[in-house]
Image (cartoon, helix red, strand yellow):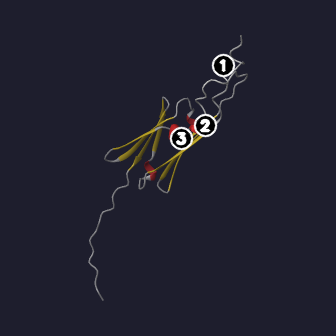
Amino acid sequence: MNYFGNGFFRNSMDLFDRNNIKETDYLRTDIYEKDDAYYLKIEVPGVDKNDIVVGFENGYLTVDVTQEHYEEEYIRKERITEEMRRSYYLGEVNEDSIKANYENGILTIRLEKQKEKEQTKKQITIE
């Protein structure tokens, strides 16, 4: 009996139905804050760091991941070419100080907080 071609895998519970997947099911993220910076730890297991693009524009940090799986002769193929994108609004940060590190499937991003502008008090002369 051939379980592979007769539906054992093909018709079993399809846990990978893409219609039931929410944005947060991919690129799961922990965000924490310290006095001087925000930190994001994003899960991207099994991805080459060259397939990850991190950008920052107008207060939004965006992470794009493209992962391709090319192999031959599958009995069942659940890992496909995936494009994942997630954006995070972080507001005022020092764009020049953003640093990213990828190690053991975790992308860690450090965003230094924007220094608060010194408030000055000025008296306005009435004419």
Question: Spatial distance from mark 2 to mark 1, Cα to Cα?
Answer: 20 Å
Residue 44 position within the rendered picture, expressed as x and y whole percent measured from the top left: 52, 34
Residue 88 position within the rendered picture, expressed as x and y whole percent measured from the top left: 47, 48
Relative side of 110 to 2, left or right: left
The amino acid sitting under disc 2 is Arg
Residue 87 position within the rendered picture, expressed as x and y whole percent measured from the top left: 51, 48
Residue drawn at x 37%, y 51% is 113
Going by the picture, which residue comes out furthest to the bottom?
A: 127
Q: Neighbour class for label 2 at 10 Å: few (<14), some, many (≥20)?
A: few
| Local SS, label 1 | loop
| Local SS, label 3 | loop
Mark earlier in primary sequence (2, 1):
1
Residues 102 and 30: in front is 30
Q: Which residue, given by chain and number where applicable, does mark 3 sit on?
A: 22
The amino acid sitting under disc 1 is Phe
Q: Neighbour class for label 3 at 10 Å: few (<14), some, many (≥20)?
A: few
- Quadrant into which the C terminus falls: bottom left
Q: Which residue, given by chain and number where applicable, does mark 1 sit on?
A: 8
In this picture, is 101 found above or below 115?
Answer: above
The amino acid sitting under disc 3 is Lys
Residue drawn at x 29%, y 80% is 124
Question: Spatial distance from mark 3 to mark 1, Cα to Cα?
Answer: 27 Å
Question: Spatial distance from mark 2 to mark 3, Cα to Cα?
Answer: 9 Å
Residues 88 and 53: in front is 88
Q: Which residue, given by chain and number where applicable, does mark 2 sit on?
A: 18
Mark earlier in primary sequence (3, 1):
1
**Discs 2/1, front:** 1
Residue drawn at x 36%, y 47% is 37
Q: Neighbour class for label 1 at 10 Å: few (<14), some, many (≥20)?
A: few
Residue 122 position within the rendered picture, expressed as x and y whole percent measured from the top left: 27, 74
